[in-house]
Amino acid sequence: TGATSIQPRGDEDHFDLSEAEVVFQSAVDPFARVELVLAFPSGESPEVEEGYIATTDLPGPLQLRGGRTKSTFGKWNLYHNHQFFSIDRPPVLSTFFGEESLTTDGLSLSVLIPNPAGLYLDSITEVGAATHGPAFNSGHRGLTYLEHFTAFFNPSRDHTLEVGATGVFGETGPPEALIAEVNAAIDAGTLPGTVQPQDGLDSRVVGFDLTWKWRPVDRNVYRSFVLQTEFLRSRREFETLDLALRALTTATVTSDGGYSYAEYQFRKRWRAGARFDWTEFPEDPLARERAVSGILRFHPSEFQELRFQIERVTRNDAAAALAGGDGDETRLFFQWIPIIGAHGAHKY
């Protein structure tokens, strides 16, 4: 299968082929299958976005995956770009994990938990090395450990509710700005050459997610509603340069963020939604950003989608400095996504 999206660049007033994806899926034998997702971002080198082998015949309610996967952190982190509800990803995910979400090279074990109530309870444990990003960017790529728990409820024939909790723990390295500041101080003679930033500081992110869906059985093709929200908290150690002490000092920053998205399907091929975002920045506890978006989606068929989005972003002075000096701004987006080839049913 293949998916391509065409949209305006976020920082310029013109159109861009944002990304093309090619997906290969195949059964290895009766006991395993392989999935490979190749991404071709505009102006960048092709990359393996996901590539893993998954078991299909382990005893009991178990599944093991090995390779590169999008980490099972909450809900939105699992989506590829063409699966988004909106054109851009929620800012909190970009701020905490980077533009390509939290991705890990390693192993993942999924367990369906038996229980007397007959509920769908799922536990996913992941161990691996996270790809480079804001939360886990240690140069030696130390291991990250993730645990995700999901509970699924079906209160009526028209309603479903899913709640989840996630925690991921690992190590972070020094940001590029700190490395540049330390090197400049050493070159200027104001700092001993033996002073070097640490490459194994603790970093952790926890999150909670909730998804409520309404889809009337007798009109499920024409009417539906979804409400999805996530809350994230980042707790990271970081170092700052104290020239008076001629040393690096360590502190801990706690940052919060999240989003809420609501979408109503009012006709067979039309959906309208709104998203509210808020985020703090792990590298600056005083920086804060908020955004409100309106989204309109049109599906001519299951193989094609057009999206329209207007977004209003507000930042305080500290966040504007991190965003290159941009304070409040209004952004308009249009995206056109064609999908070719056979593809499986969408995940819940």
Image (cartoon, rainbow, N blue to C red):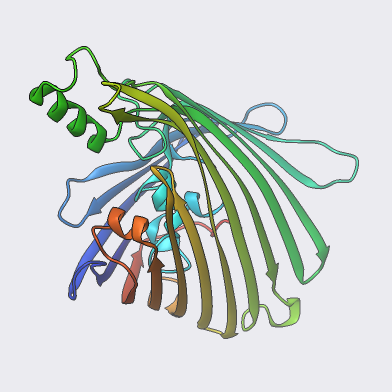
- Decide if residue 9 is on the left or right side of residue 216: left
Which of the 4 image quarters holds residue 347? bottom right
User: Is residue 304 in view from this perspective?
Assistant: no
Residue 127 percent location from the top left of the image: 51, 26
Residue at position x 34%, y 21% in the image: 199
Q: Residue furthest right?
A: 116
- Decide if residue 219 is on the left or right side of residue 259: right
Residue 19 percent location from the top left of the image: 26, 59
In which quadrant is the N terminus drawn? bottom left
- Decide if residue 262 is on the left or right side of residue 247: right
In which quadrant is the C terminus drawn? bottom right
How many numbered callouts? 0
Compared to 158, does 129 lie above or below? above
Residue at position x 67%, y 78% in the image: 220
Residue at position x 90%, y 40% in the image: 116
Residue at position x 50%, y 83% in the image: 269
Residue 247 percent location from the top left of the image: 29, 20
Compared to 310, does 1 lie above or below? above
Q: Residue furthest top?
A: 194
